[in-house]
Image (cartoon, grey):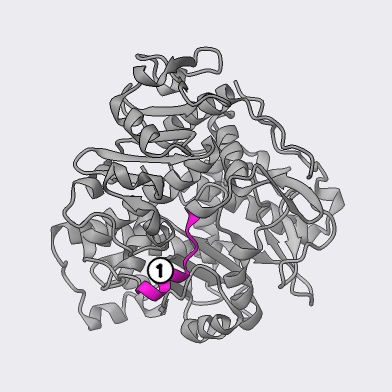
Amino acid sequence: VSAEPPEHDPRVDLAAAYRLFDFLGWVEGIDDAITLRVPGSERLILTKPFGVHASEVTAENAIEVDLDDIDSMQRTVYAAAPQARCIMHVHTTAALAVASSQRGLTPTSNYSASVMRAIAYRVEDLAERRILIIRNDGLLVHGPTVPDAFIVLYRVLGACEFQVATNAIDDGLALSPELLARTVDVTLNPAQTHVRAEGRRVPALARRLFDTMSRVADGDGSAAPRNMPR
Amino acid sequence: MTTIAKPAEQGLGAAAFDPEEWALRVELAACYRLFDYLGWTEMIFNHITMRVPGPEHHFLINPFGLHYSEVTASNLVKIDLDGRIIGHSAYPVNPAGFVIHSALHAAVPEARCIMHTHSTNGLAVASSRRGLEPTNRYAASIIDTVAYHDFEGPSVHDDEKARLVADLGEKRILILRNHGLLVHAPTIPDAFVVLLKLERACEIQVATNTIDVGITIPDEVLEISYDYSITPGASRGARRIFDGMIRQVDKIDASYKS
């Protein structure tokens, strides 16, 4: 067994995720939700206090609540997917457009191709699938860690935004079932925090992506904000 | 708020590099910042690559794991056609993303600079059945030099490289179906101007097509619309546009020059 991965403070990850959502334009008001199960617990949920804006969340003001006291949609998802440790729920324009369309998500970009097999439209399918498109309402993802949920959410929100723009032109070039079967499902990435690369122990892709984007969102303001699918 | 570290700076500076290479590093790093300024970024993914002077096929590429806003002249990574790092780098590169670039760099001598984006409007046109249509002035100026490559799956295998090269042919723009946009040119400013026109063409087409199919520009008008700036050697205009945009970048943050 190799050395244990370094601990990532769940409070820091939660606060960083909220700040990152704000930077990326994935928040609206105070109704967006990122929650995690407290490590080692099935019932304790870490989240932001009601009324606090995403940009105001810190490791210190995050709160622990019982599963019975969280939003009913999230509670239902934690029940349906016992392996879920983190849930991210958004109402971005593109996600709502796809959720509110008759077509739903179509396999017309390499983004949608990489998440297609993880899409569910019913909560009961979430034991096997990571993404829930809530008809007329929004979209949520779950994952084993905050970075793992984030990378899946980024792929599916990209897919929604690209589809909205594509469908302004026409119904899009659908990828064949053969191509879809050959496209790696991004949600199948193992929830490793570190991998070996070039002889060094480096953060796995999801962690590396999350840390870099958190750093940029939290940075000196030189990065152009809100330049990603929203 | 977080404990996430700032990127390690190599801090090598101009003295550590051949002057010609250093000038290209500064220009390429500026271009990465310009892409961020324009919203042509995709978190830590995608590349702009530029061949360095000399007989070797060596290229500068962004360090994997950094955002475009964090790229500097010093932390750009020099690699060969196989994605192997030349000399020292504090950062790895993303070899998977470099495959399409390396296939075209290897086969097309004038493709010294290659830019690849996943912009929303670019992906919309790339993922539509119609493709790019000559319904606006920007599309008219470049449509002559557009080629298409069908999506073959997420990873590019050796046999696909030949098809990429064949599909590109003599063109400057390759629309990667279901995937994104790619342009090449002999210099960074030349590639930038072609991509700028392409991105604008896609953006306007998406907006036009929310209204209707658009007004097709007739062939005789298209013939006089082809843009001089995409003719090799006519790069003075491109340089002027690029430098003007970089001055906007410099007002925000000129740290890429280090």
In the visual, does B74 lie left or right of B27? right
Mark 1 is on which residue type?
Leu
The picture places residue B42, in percent across and down from the top left corner, at 50, 50
Image-quadrant location for residue B51: bottom right
Q: Residue at x 16, y 67 (%)?
A: B213
The picture places residue B34, in percent across and down from the top left corner, at 53, 48
In the visual, does B10 lie left or right of A144? right
Q: Residue at x 65, y 42 (%)?
A: A193
Q: 10 Å neighbourhood of mark 1: few (<14), some, or many (≥20)? A: many
In terms of depth relative to the viewer, which is nearer, B104 or B235? Answer: B104
Relative to B126, is B145 above or below? below
Q: Residue at x 76, y 40 (%)?
A: B9
In reply to whether residue B63 is colored magenta, the answer given is no
Image-quadrant location for residue A73: top left
Q: Residue at x 24, y 83 (%)?
A: B220
Q: Main secondary structure of the magenta part?
A: helix
The picture places residue A90, in percent across and down from the top left corner, at 34, 35
Residue linked to disc 1: A180
Chain identity of mark 1: A
Question: Which segment is the magenta one?
Answer: A176-186
In terms of depth relative to the viewer, which is nearer, B72 or A181? Answer: A181
In the structure shown, which secondary structural element does the residue marked by tag 1 occupy? helix
In terms of depth relative to the viewer, which is nearer, B55 or B206? Answer: B206
* Quarter of the image that includes the C terminus of chain B: top right
